[in-house]
Image: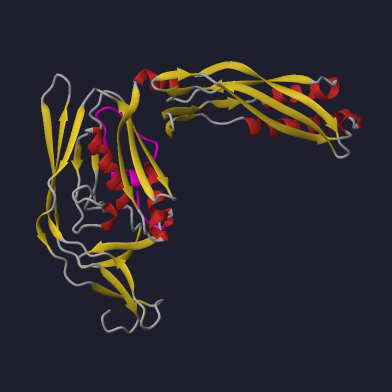
Amino acid sequence: MIHPIWPLLLCLAASSADALSVQVRWSVPEPRLVRGQVQRPAEHHALTVRLPADLASRPAAQQSAELQRAAAALAARVSRAPQDIRFTLTPGGWVGRARTGWTVSPRDAQAALTRAVRGGQGVMTLPVRLRAPARSVRWAAGQGLTLLGSGASTFTGSPEFRVHNIRLGAARLHGQWLAPGQTLDFNALMGPVSAARGFRPGYVLAGNALRLEDGGGICQVSTTLFRAALRAGLPVTERHAHSVQVGYYGAPGLDAAVYAGSKNLKVRNDTAGPLLVQFRWNLQTQALHADLFGRSDGRQVRVEGSGLRRAQLPPGPTFVRSPELAAGDTRRIDMPAPGGVTEVRRTVTVPGGPARTDRFRSEYRPWGGVIAVPAGDPRG
């Protein structure tokens, strides 16, 4: 969508010994969505274009070439592509912001700069064409987008490689849109989890031991998204519990394991509107959040856990050799956890319709954890 042209103001600044400065200022509306209402505050911007101080004394052809170069650089600096709406949590609640696209014609920029330099005018205007993104603030207001549900988890105590993989994985899903009736396929959206795509090797559970694979920690992302889908009342068509309890995930039954080719997380958008997936993380609090935005149908969601039943005490730890450890040193890599069975029940009630109860069963085997020992240690 193309909007009317908005003026930019250019002011000639005093010349210095080396350059003539042209100050460029512009104000444009940038809509935002606050509590379902569209606001259109103006945003003010400024930049400086520097031209040779002796430009006016140069031959006309040199002047034209210099102004053409400066105008092209100015147009490139000001022009920007539009971006779809995203929501930011503020002290006053969620605020939706998109980014309006700006297009500056190099020819118009050159004409304005030429008038400013040759005419000695104090203020000049430069046209900027505004272009709304496909999913603009006004579009989101028409769709009735609001927060449907959030999920949270903590990665406190995670090694650096794990934090890196969590942030990278969350960033790959951040900003994904689902049309009504569409299913989110976690593994498909994540794509190959490999070093070639930026993931770092980390520990993953394989059988009765830990081993290093690219992307260790990515289940933190799927777990957090699963919790958001639970709270939003969205159908979860595929979910797998981990084989053992993972200390990072807290209460049992609220985790979601993923592994390409065997375990996936799938969530269907059964609302009448589009669904936006967002992630945010805080390195200070070491928390990861997933937030789902869509069109509310007034559904009420209740989530209840049964606690751990048929509990089994953890066995002794597994030992693995770590060449970087000095003789006599050890390092706890993974914490022990009891085994058992738990069930999370979710009841979703839509106004005017019957209640739906979903059950998510998790069975964990007892896990003794893993301790790293030096090379040559007989326990490894």
Residue lying at 22% horizontally and 33% vertically, measured from the top left: 234
Please tell me whether residue 370 is drawn above or below residue 259 in the rendered image. below
Segment tinted magenta in the rendering: 174-195
Q: Left or right: 343 with respect to 246?
A: left
Q: Left or right: 194 with respect to 313?
A: right
Residue 178 on the magenta segment: yes
> Looking at the image, which is closer to me, 147 or 170?
147
Residue lying at 21% horizontally and 26% vertically, measured from the top left: 299
Single out the residue that lies furthest toward the right: 57
Q: How is the image coloured?
A: secondary structure
Residue 292 image position (x, y, % from top left): 32, 34
Q: Is residue 268 visible?
A: no
The image quarter containing residue 322 is bottom left
The image quarter containing residue 51 is top right
Residue 33 on the magenta segment: no
Residue 365 image position (x, y, % from top left): 14, 61
